[in-house]
Image: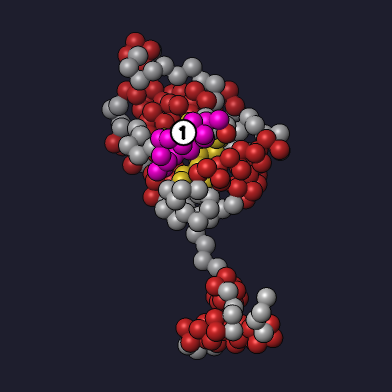
Amino acid sequence: KERDESSCQAALAALVDGATNNENILALAVAAARQDASLGEISFALEQAFGRYETTPRPVTGVYSEAYADDKRFTQVVAGVESVARRLGRPPRLLVAKMGQDGHDRGANVIASAFTDMGFDVVSGPLFQTPRETLEMALEKDVDAIGCSSLAAGHKTLIPELISLLNEEGRADIKVIAGGVIPPQDYDFLKKSGVQGIYGPGSNVVECGADMLRLLGHNMPPADDNEKATE
């Protein structure tokens, strides 16, 4: 409220010009900060010159299918995915979402790769999405479920907001699950908010796939049901 707006904007313009012309942008950023420019404004000024870094995560295929080649449970889950695909007319589709200021995406990439090898059609969302952006991507890609990966303590705000937006759009049929570092004492809160599955560290990815099939209406037997697994 108290800054000299013209001086601030002039410093930000100088930062854009300096970044474009390969000048010392640290010095120019400090000069802008001394004119009360915010960190967001300074970052945005640099974006005008350099653009915004973006990456499209892609699942790595073949790792889990090779490791579990002789695993009966994995084979059973793959068969379940194929059964659901026949019913839907396409493979079941999962959006792996990273919302909020959470750059920890290794777990999300592991899940994306594992579910791809099990036969799911996986859409990997970009880092730092808002709940509304996640909603829009889910609707655009026509997904059956959203897996929210959370490792930065945003699960009690971001995930309920996403579920609320889904409900407003009349898409409560899209299943929402959560994974990552989520304290067990928060599980009940998330379930009451509409989360249908929660998977913490150490969760077996094949059983996560089996749970997803159950959520999608497939009659998936328990892991220790050897008779049904044989069938």
Q: Which residue is mark 1?
A: 187
Write the residue at 55% across / 30% down.
Answer: 192
Asked if residue 5 is positioned above or below residue 209 in the image, the reply reads below
Query: Percent position (x, y) of residue 127?
Result: 50, 55
Main SS of the magenta segment?
helix
Which image quarter holds the N terminus?
A: bottom right
Query: Percent position (x, y) of residue 166?
Result: 65, 38
Asked if residue 1 is positioned above or below residue 223 in the image, the reply reads below
Secondary structure of the residue carrying tag 1 is helix
Closer to us: 45 or 205: 45
Query: Percent position (x, y) of residue 182?
Result: 42, 41
Write the residue at 50% across / 56% down.
Answer: 101
Closer to us: 152 or 15: 152
Q: How many marks?
A: 1
Which image quarter holds the C terminus?
A: top left
The stretch of residues the image draws in magenta is: 178-192
**What amino acid does circle 1 point to?**
Tyr
View extreme (right): residue:
169
View extreme (top): residue:
227
